[in-house]
Amino acid sequence: MKNLYFFTKKEIVESWRTYRSAIVILIFLIFGLMNPLLAKLTPEIVKLTVGEAMAKTIPEPTSLDSWTQFFKNVNQIGLIVVALIFSGTVSNEVSRGTLINLVTKGLRRGAIIGGKIVNLLFQWSISFLVAFLVTWGYTNYYFDDSKSSHLFQAVFPVWLFGVFLMSLILFSSTIARNSYEGMLVTGGGVVLLLLLSLFDNLKKYNPISLVTQNLLFLQQGPAFEKYVPAMVLAFLLSLIFLLLSTLVLNKKKL
């Protein structure tokens, strides 16, 4: 446990020193500010671009529009940014040989994987929380309605999918020789899930549903229960990726 603690601390400090954490948090903060503001200003933007007559045909913006922007930005751009920044979390250290001294001094390779995933989950959770809280605060300020009544059911699946993606990024980086290969493996995994989502009978089991059905969850809370199998599978796959990452790193030449 002591090894895990010190390596995790080293990972978190290094993420801050290399500005990776700051970049991710700043991007998610911008998303949080943009989501309600863009929803609020959409009628004015339409009025300026296509004319007042067309703007009058657009419904008055609501909290649903703000959360639509949230899910669009976080689920797409946000997760891509996280994947790009942390895609070399293991492969870069292996290629530079920075893990050799640590392992020869007694650091277990399992602790390396443990520290890496704790750091990834920490970065993801903090960034996600920043975007959520800022969006939530400004949405309540701009839109005083009750149209977003199932907020937890809508945002929790996104966070859980992020957990799944962090474990996939870690596994991809462990088997890859560099960050580019890691990005390809991660991207391939996501594309596979997108292809599987074409089959309606598989949607309730598919982890990708956790970031494609959020507006449904937001408006219809009971729909959340239908996708519990996808949440369970995402969690189990996360554990499997962690186990495989440990097994691969144990056999990998540093």
Image (cartoon, rainbow, N blue to C red):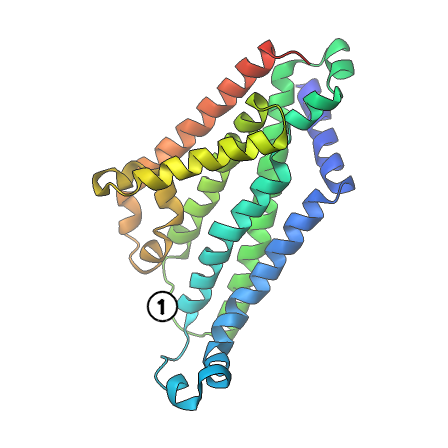
Q: Residue 117: horizontal and vertical position, in percent?
A: 58, 30
Position of 198 with respect to 45 (left or right) is: left
Q: Residue furthest left?
A: 201
Q: How many residues crowd mark 1 within 10 Å: few (<14), some (14–19), many (20+)?
A: few
Identified at 42% across, 76% down, the residue is: 61
Work out whether 156 lies above or below 109: below
Identified at 73% across, 19% down, the residue is: 99
Report the residue marked by disc 1: 147
Q: Residue 212: horizontal and vertical position, in percent?
A: 37, 50
Position of 104 with respect to 194 (left or right) is: right
Work out whether 100 lies above or below 55: above
Identified at 41% across, 57% down, the residue is: 151
Task: Give the SS element for disc 1.
Answer: loop
Work out whether 179 lies above or below 153: above
All told, the count of numbered labels is 1
The image quarter in which residue 179 lies: top right
The amino acid pointed to by label 1 is Lys
Q: Residue 116: horizontal and vertical position, in percent?
A: 63, 28
Q: Residue 49: horizontal and vertical position, in percent?
A: 49, 82
Judging depth in this view, the residue of 168 and 154 nearest the camera is: 168
The image quarter in which residue 130 lies: bottom right
Q: Quadrant of the C terminus?
A: top right
Identified at 41% across, 45% down, the residue is: 157
Q: Quadrant of the N terminus?
A: top right
Work out whether 36 lies above or below 127: below
